[in-house]
Amino acid sequence: MRHITLDSTFEEYQSFSELPQVDQALINEAKKAALDAYAPYSHFHVGAAVELENGKIIRGNNQENAAYPSGLCAERVALFAAGAQHPGEKIKSIAITAYPESTDNASVPVSPCGDCRQVMAEYEQRYGQKIRLIMESGEGKFIVAPSVKQLLPFLFNAESMAAK
Ligand code: THU
């Protein structure tokens, strides 16, 4: 037996103004998206904004349902809309932001769930291009992951099913 230690590298920005301008713009789009979330059960409003290679921005927000598992996270709403409306267009980055109703629209830290990471990883593989993830991390700071792989080691993908 041996231990395996994996390194993940992220960028941390101390403030919104320290973020590169393209990231700031995408976070602002995600914030707009969060305002339109349908979250009557969790009261947790999540917004995502996907930037495509052609410059188009696709917004998504969480869409909940009385049958709880039927709802969908903001990230997947945005990613699937991008895949459906702009097939073949590479995804450059995704910004994610969230606020609970109790905070009066003030953002809180948010990080994509495992299912959303899995979906992002598929798009990275499909388009052969890393997706930059921009996330609020609390106290006005931001964490950027240069690739979904940083958040999902040992991921399951098409190669996992290939005959050996
Ligand atoms: N949610 C998202 O939309 N994205 C995340 O990254 C985390 C969780 C949603 C799902 C559900 O509507 C609510 O937040 C509470 O889990």
Image (cartoon, rainbow, N blue to C red):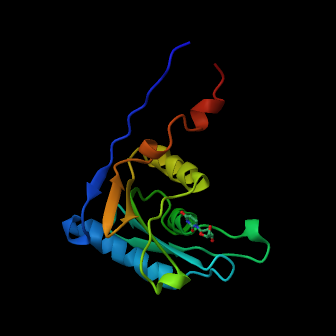
Residue 78, percent from left and from top: 52, 68
Residue 156, percent from left and from top: 60, 38
Identify the residue at image location x=57%, y=56%.
113
Quadrant of ligand 1: it is: bottom right
Q: Nearer the viewer, residue 47 or 104?
A: 104
As drawn, is 67 to the left or to the right of 104?
right
Identify the residue at image location x=45%, y=84%.
105
Identify the residue at image location x=34%, y=49%.
146
In the picture, residue 62 is in which quadrant?
Answer: bottom right
> Quadrant of the image for the C terminus?
top right
> Quadrant of the image for the N terminus?
top right
Residue 52, percent from left and from top: 38, 63
Identify the residue at image location x=73%, y=76%.
65
In the picture, residue 49 is in which quadrant?
Answer: bottom left
In the depicted structure, whether residue 122 falls above or below residue 54: above
As drawn, is 155 to the left or to the right of 41?
left
Residue 86, percent from left and from top: 48, 65
